[in-house]
Amino acid sequence: MAMLFNKRNIKRILLIRFSCIGDVILTTPAVATIRHHFPRAHITYLTEKAPSEALKNNPHIDRVLIFEKGIVRKMAREKPYDLVINFDWFYSSQALCFLSRAKYRIGFPAAEKSIYKLEACGAYNIRPIKPLKNPDVICQFLNLTRSLGLKDYTKDTGFYLTNQEKSFAASYMKKHKLDGNLIIGMHPGGRRKEELWPTDKFAALADRGIKNFSAVVLIFQGPGEESRVIDMYAKIKQKHKTFIVPEFSLREYASLVKNCDVFIAHDRGPMHIAISLGVKTIGIFTTPYARIWFPYKENKDCAYVEKKTAKKITAEEVFRKIKKCKKKCKKV
């Protein structure tokens, strides 16, 4: 049975979102909202190992807990939470809500066809309010905090670098004599091969950026993407103004992305990292869901290009987006 939420005496809060990196970043406006309304509460965020890196140094989170073997026993030994918010839809996350022993528990209802109707048997005891029509994903997460009577604090996502990470990037920039240049970052890799923009188009875009803006192009990569990066680099004509960034840790990667003036990536974690760092970003989408998964409409420094298949997106279309972003760059 649903209960009314009382903000008083909320001292321990648990937030849950297992994956992926981009999805976890998209919960950060809701996290900031929670911190704003509960400045003295201890906030724990439960997630998987990879996305946990995106939450380090976040000023709104006291502890990041890794979802791994033995997590249930670990939580059982701890003091119960007062409030649990589940930003996930998975059965395992709903089960953890139920087992958390929290006084207040809220999350997304299970899909109608789901065999796991946990919210009907105690996973949640606060029912979410009806969301606005066609909400983007940030609004979907904020709808859970709104259901608790919490007014939105921000809609901006956050990725927070340490001073050490900023120093790492500064040293890299100095070593390769990149300071003072207009830098275009590109991440040609991604998860699903069928959604990837062809490397020859990335290469053509790089050449246009170098020729028209005297820019330097940094090609970024993630695990297992080296061959695709090399293939793109081989097709670039102006290699003297192009650098392949080695595969660094996620935090080091992010510190270098922060130094880009414009960043181009597929609809994946790197795109959300760049936007969260305040970098002018262009997302490449091959699904009809950009309006949901690119919730940055109010940020005029960001844009996306969306077609049914990646091959139909032209280098000219993306270049036009770069031109608009470049006008707002401090470097000329």
Image (cartoon, rainbow, N blue to C red):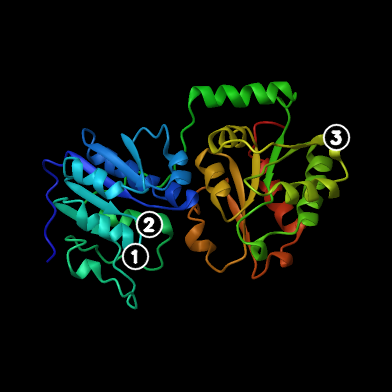
Q: Residues within 10 Å of mark 3 (few under 14, many from 20)?
A: few
The residue at 35%/58% (across/down) is 88
Q: Which residue is mark 1?
A: 132
The earlier-in-sequence mark between 2 and 3 is 2
Q: Amino acid at mark 1?
A: Leu
Q: Secondary structure at mark 1?
A: loop
Q: Nearer the viewer, residue 112 or 66?
A: 66
Q: Amino acid at mark 2?
A: Cys
* x and y, in percent, of residue 302 in the image: 57, 48
183 shown above or below 112: above
The residue at 62%/36% (across/down) is 248
Alpha carbon of mark 2 to alpha carbon of mark 3: how far? 44 Å
**The C terminus sits in image quarter:** top right
Q: Which residue is mark 2?
A: 139
Q: Residue furthest right?
A: 237
286 shown above or below 188: below
Q: Which residue is mark 3?
A: 240
**The N terminus sits in image quarter:** bottom left
Alpha carbon of mark 1 to alpha carbon of mark 2: how far? 8 Å
